Image (spheres, grey):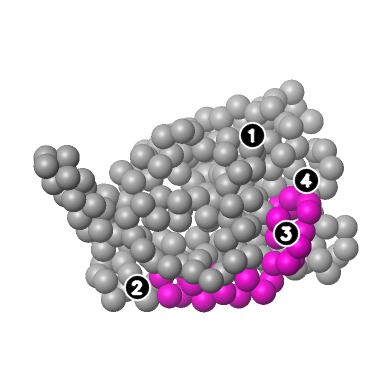
Amino acid sequence: MPDKLTLISHALCPYVQRAAIVLDEKNVPFDRVMIDLADKPDWFRTASPLGKVPLLKLDGDRYLFESAPIVEFLDETEGSRLHPADPVERARHRAYIEFASQILNGIGTLYNARDDTGFYAAGEALRAKFRHLENALDPAGPFFAGSSFSLVDAAFAPVFRYFDVFDGFADLGTFDALDRVTAWRDSLAARPSVRKAVSEDYPALLTAFLQKRGSWMSHLLDLRSREQALQAAQ
Ligand SMILES: N[C@@H](CCC(=O)N[C@@H](CS)C(=O)NCC(=O)O)C(=O)O
């Protein structure tokens, strides 16, 4: 293994967070290099065949790309295993990591929706996925598979982080009456590795990103800013 790993990152990327969480869970010290995805440097284009973060720099010119192989590599080479030993359970965990990626796509659909119809339809599609999760979770909690933190938890923590920001200005009701999912969300939010995966200004950075989408969500944020300005003037 190289002396120190480097995680090639972007401040808002949920897939980068997966790798950062796993590195921290395994107590692996690492450096971060931030990429401006609107102006990708040449070395990044060479190292990242898909032009995406995360990349994990091992040493010299050796990079790994794609979050799933990156976290599995870390799981195989560092500390105690976060993936289950049983092959069926492991396959199931991989499937739910993909499920988390599909939810991230749904979150993109939500924040890019141009009007209220598209926005609430995207919200309802997300809620249906969380309704499914309510029954897929180990009822004992606090994590996806019970007492042990797994790679599925590392994949879902960045999903829930979006809703921590959305909750400030949109009443989506995504988790209403989904008690297990809500408890899971709370447990993940309190986990030190999850807290450390982003910088303190993450909520402000995400809000600025959402404001610029020209979408229904941008409109809701605009309404909230106007309300706050009115209240401040009173
Ligand atoms: N399947 C990839 C998804 C990574 C991804 O979508 N990264 C985004 C940022 S969150 C990216 O780098 N986008 C830049 C681009 O597509 O140009 C993974 O799991 O690593």
Read off the residue under disc 4.
75
Q: Is residue 203 left or right of residue 196?
A: left
- In the image, which is nearer the foreground, mark 1 or mark 4? 4
Q: Position of residue 13 (x, y in %)?
A: 49, 46
Labels 1 and 3: the sequence-earlier one: 1
**SS category of the residue bearing label 2:** helix
Q: Are marks 1 and 2 in contact (CB under 8 Å)?
A: no
Kindly identify which numbered label has been placed on residue 57.
Answer: 1
Q: Is residue 204 above or below residue 149?
A: above
Name the residue at the top extreme.
Answer: 3
Can residue 125 be found in the magenta stretch?
A: yes
Can residue 5 be found in the magenta stretch?
A: no
Within 10 Å of the Cα at label 3, are there few (<14), some (14-19), or many (20+) other Cα atoms?
some
Q: Is residue 113 left or right of residue 70?
A: left
| Residue displayed at 83% across by 69% down | 88
Q: Amino acid at mark 1?
A: Lys
Within 10 Å of the Cα at label 2, are there few (<14), some (14-19), or many (20+) other Cα atoms?
some
Q: Position of residue 184 (x, y in %)?
A: 63, 57
| Residue displayed at 74% across by 23% down | 3
- In the image, which is nearer the foreground, mark 4 or mark 3? 3
Labels 2 and 4: the sequence-earlier one: 4
Q: Are marks 1 and 3 in contact (CB under 8 Å)?
A: no
CA separation in Å, label 1 and label 3: 34 Å
Labels 1 and 4: the sequence-earlier one: 1
Read off the residue under disc 3.
141
Q: Are marks 3 and 2 in contact (CB under 8 Å)?
A: no
Residue extent of the magenta highlight = 123-151
